[in-house]
Image: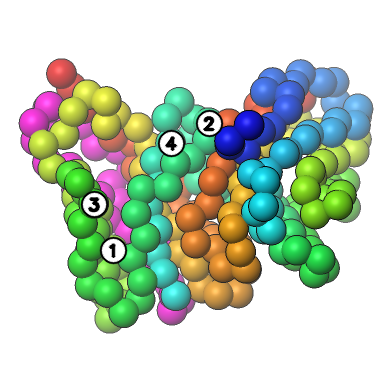
Amino acid sequence: GAGVSQSPSNKVTEKGKDVELRCDPISGHTALYWYRQSLGQGLEFLIYFQGNSAPDKSGLPSDRFSAERTGGSVSTLTIQRTQQEDSAVYLCASSLGQGTEKLFFGSGTQLSVL
Amino acid sequence: SQQGEEDPQALSIQEGENATMNCSYKTSINNLQWYRQNSGRGLVHLILIRSNEREKHSGRLRVTLDTSKKSSSLLITASRAADTASYFCATDTGRRALTFGSGTRLQVQP
């Protein structure tokens, strides 16, 4: 595919369950970002991967959140013991290089925690 | 708090009118970008302006940057119903990922 792919597009889960969100960036893009957007709000930075460097995890809201990027490509964002306040759209983006010029976004995963 | 703050939060205009959105930020930047979001899902990059540039054009879009006032504006000329969306400014401070503002919701009435 030509764009950033995220799955699932929608996820409904019960409070306390773990969820995994997947992001498949554009081929050749070395930088990958996760953002979170609550209803009607701006984007909240979560985590940033650049090549083989250690990821910038400074935006993760709690230790229930973690992310990995395997082989410099696909990334998985994991939320353990989900809470209702975790409900949001989780957006993944990728870019060509080390700079933050022109991010390409996926369509997001709408997470609903009941 | 957000690095970028858009103003107004919401804007409603008639087709054919111009729409102006403003963005203010707090710290020095390498560049400022504007993105568009339809229906609360993926964002699409519109235009990037570097800190040493003052104005940039792309089709019906005009972006200005005033680094002394730490502000930017996005002008959409001759708006169309299809321009209805949320518009976000994002700042690159060189430290980490882009920091996004809270957005302006634009409604263009046909």
What's the CA distance linking mark 2 and mark 1? 24 Å
Looking at the rendered structure, whether the residues under marks 2 and 4 are on a common chain is answered as: yes
Q: Is residue A85 left or right of residue B16?
A: right
The range drawn in magenta is B1-29
Residue contact at pointers 4 and 3, CB within 8 angstroms: no
Residue contact at pointers 3 and 2, CB within 8 angstroms: no
Q: Which mark is residue B41?
A: 2
Q: Is residue A92 left or right of residue A62?
A: left
In the structure shown, which secondary structural element does the residue marked by tag 2 occupy?
A: loop
In the image, what residue occupies the spot 12% across and 27% down? B14
Find disc 3 in the rendering and name its residue. Answer: B58
What's the CA distance linking mark 3 and mark 2? 23 Å
In the image, what residue occupies the spot 27% across and 31% down? B83
Decide which of tag 3 and tag 1 comes sooner along the chain.
Answer: 3
Residue flagged by tag 3: what amino acid is it?
A: Ser
Find disc 1 in the rendering and name its residue. Answer: B72
Residue contact at pointers 2 and 4, CB within 8 angstroms: yes
Q: Is residue A97 left or right of residue B42?
A: right
In the structure shown, which secondary structural element does the residue marked by tag 3 occupy?
A: strand
In the image, what residue occupies the spot 66% across and 37% down? A90
Q: Nearer the viewer, residue B22 or A47?
A: A47
Compared with B72, B50 (above or below) is: below
What's the CA distance linking mark 3 and mark 1? 15 Å
Q: Nearer the viewer, residue A14 or B21?
A: B21
Decide which of tag 3 and tag 2 comes sooner along the chain.
Answer: 2
Q: Nearer the viewer, mark 3 or mark 2?
A: 3
Res A28 seen here: yes
In the rendered structure, the residue with mark 4 lies on which chain? B
Callout 2 crowding tier (Cα within 10 Å): few <14, some 14–19, many ≥20: some
Residue flagged by tag 2: what amino acid is it?
A: Arg
Find disc 4 in the rendering and name its residue. Answer: B37
